[in-house]
Image: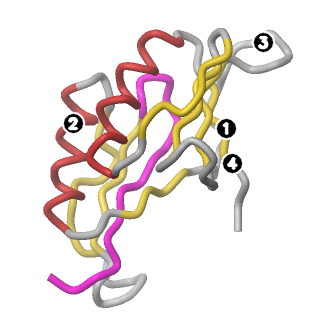
Amino acid sequence: MFSHVTIGTNIPGRALVFYDRLLAPLGLARIAQHGDAVGYAAAEDASPQLWIMPPFDGGPASPGNGAMVAFQASNRDTVRLLHGIALANGGSCEGPPGLRLHYHPDYYGAYLRDPDGNKLCIVCHMPE
């Protein structure tokens, strides 16, 4: 459905450490790096891709109000693992791992912010 998603950063080195560690348990790795722009995916030519980079216009990166990127985990343990990895690497909690029954009976998610303030979700849609 998507080709790629781009998340802005003001401190590329810090963002790369955060995303390297957060995405590895999902099987996502760096597939390309062009200056301060780094792409992640499951394989080199795979889509969708996630790109982390400073904004093209040279202005400061800032989180969009209402914008969020959600990463799908295969099980609830992975949701908990990734939430912990995020917090240990400069992220902040926006909602601890748990069921969100208002979405559906098996929606198990955690919400967080990366070090630049971008909102992320880690979610598993499968039963325990």
Residue where numbered disc 3 is placed: 59
The quadrant the N terminus occupies is: bottom right
Q: In x, y percent, where is residue 58?
A: 80, 10
Mark identifier at residue 4: 4
In this rendering, which labeled residue sits more in front, label 2 or label 4?
Answer: 4
| Residue occupying image coordinates x 59% and y 32% | 39
Q: Which of the two discs, 1 and 2, labels the residue nearer the N terminus?
A: 1
Q: Amino acid at mark 2?
A: Ile
Residue at the bottom extreme?
A: 105
Q: CA distance from mark 4 to mark 1?
A: 7 Å
Q: Secondary structure at mark 1?
A: strand
Mark 3 residue crowding within 10 angstroms, few (<14) / some (14–19) / many (20+) = few
Q: Are marks 3 and 1 in contact (CB under 8 Å)?
A: no
Q: CA distance from mark 1 to mark 2?
A: 21 Å
| Residue occupying image coordinates x 60% and y 52% | 46
Residue where numbered disc 2 is placed: 85
Q: Residue 98's quadrant in the figure?
A: bottom left
The answer to whether residue 121 is magenta is yes
Q: In x, y percent, where is residue 70?
A: 48, 57
In this rendering, which labeled residue sits more in front, label 4 or label 1?
Answer: 4
Q: Are marks 2 and 3 in contact (CB under 8 Å)?
A: no
Left or right, 49 with reference to 20: right
Mark 1 residue crowding within 10 angstroms, few (<14) / some (14–19) / many (20+) = some
| Residue occupying image coordinates x 26% and y 47% | 25
| Residue occupying image coordinates x 56% and y 51% | 68
Classify 66 as above or below 98. above
Task: Kindly report the secondary structure that dominates the magenta region of the rendered protein.
Answer: loop
In this rendering, which labeled residue sits more in front, label 3 or label 1?
Answer: 1
Task: Point out the stretch of residues depicted in magenta.
Answer: 114-128
